[in-house]
Image: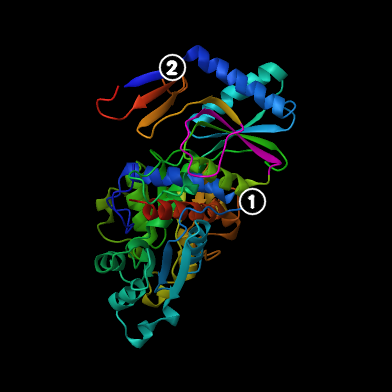
Amino acid sequence: MTRKIIDEIGFGRTLTRLAHEILERNKGAGNIAIIGIRTRGEYLAKRIADIIFSIEKKEIKIGLLDITLYRDDLKEIQYQPLLKGTEIDFDLNKKDIILIDDVLFTGRTVRAALDELTDLGRPASIQLAVLIDRGHRELPIRADFVGKNLPTSLDEEVKVLMKEIDPEDSVVLKSLKEGGN
Amino acid sequence: MALQNRHLLGLEGVSKEEIKLILDTATTFREVLERPIKKVPTLQGKTIVNLFFESSTRTRISFELAERRLSADVVNFSADMSSLKKGETLKDTARNIEAMKIDMVVMRHASPGAALFLSRVIDSVIINAGDGGHEHPTQALLDLYSIQEKHKRIDGLKICIVGDISHSRVALSNIYGLKTMGAEVAVCGPATLIPSEIEKHGIGIFNKIDDAIAWADVLNVLRIQLERQDRSYFPSLREYRKYFAVTKERIERAEKQITIMHPGPINRDVELSADVADGKHSIILQQVLNGVAVRMAVLYLLGTRS
């Protein structure tokens, strides 16, 4: 069974709120840079940077993080993930980094991202923004900015769809249990 | 997508998709090599043995750097300190090393087929770092990467391999890889150093270096192996230089853009004149940097393959 949690209008509003919260917490866009975790974090980062530009008229640096090389489960996963590469062409040192991902789940992706960022430089701070927090953390990690808290069970799957690569902007919850309703 | 074979023994039979996967993966590692901390934790806990039965500085250092930058544990083993001198067979040496719980073996050996043999007698993942005059797949892969980086493509390019083709594992691996990627390939050198029936690979042969320069987009100049000169494949170095050396005059005479490559170590002013080796056409030092990235890609793809 599939249930739509956020539709296209809600999606846009959520991102706008996240952008405002980021600006409020950081007292403007002055020292921030946004880094999206591939794949969908990349598009979220670009969208939020666009919204921040429309509010503050200030271009924000965007970077992309591929955390594959830092995963702790490379030996266990069935298929070999394709490396897409990290692209950060600015200096992280002393910047306030907004790390963006679509769904916060076990926290292991964020752990990998933090390790990678630490190898790349020494930012003034790293803040985590996610579109969906679905719970079930396995590590002591929490988000600074959350689009929507979505309590889920482990046999559900949260899918974030984005127009850049999907048919529409939305968030759907899918039950993986056979015959569930 | 993953590599078909769990070993890398050669480029013969490796598909275009697989080579493309390795080259794309290497691009990611090129970025890692530009970082302040040039190291990722990907192969943490894996132990890799560099088993070099033939002397090699460059390839061994390149592999060792690639292994360390992926956080693997590295053990080096070279022939001059080995028990081979005490009469142990390759099989026994390898089995003894494997008994110490290792995951991958990078091997250089003087006998063609040594890497294949090793893959049949032990369970570890084997990477061939040169087996006699047979194959040297990671060198060819870094050559492919360097060509693609410079020309933005490989398909349709004309590449001529110059020098001692007969004794060259670099030449054979390059021929397999380049043909698979859709390049036009030719060789050029003294008739005594070109194997008979090489044209069976679907490649051209030039007897004159000026013709090769006029034809090619890329010249991959191989080292003249002075240590083999006791067999007199050509009358003298002076004569080789006169007929086959790639020099500034020859390149200028052709009046064209051409890329110069060399797997190293160079005999300056024998196969390649110093001004060309250091000149604007040369991508020799790029090849060295790309070598580390390409070897990281191969180690990553084989080391994390499920």
Residue B63's spot in the image, x, y percent?
47, 61
Between B8 and B166, the residue placed more toward the observer is B8
Chain designation of label 1: B
Instruction: Confirm whether residue B206 shows in the render.
Output: no
Dot 1 falls on a residue whose secondary structure is: loop
Task: Say which residue appears at 38% left-offset and 39% top-offset.
Answer: B155
Does mark 2 fall on the same chain as mark 1? Answer: no
Farthest residue to the top: give it. Answer: A9
Farthest residue to the bottom: give it. Answer: B86
Magenta region includes residue A65:
no
Q: In which quarter of the image is residue B81?
A: bottom left
Task: Say which residue appears at 28% left-offset and 25% top-offset.
Answer: A180
Over which residues does the magenta segment extend?
A: A123-144
Residue that mark 2 sits on: A168
Q: Which colour scheme is used?
A: rainbow
Above-or-below relation of B289 to A28: below
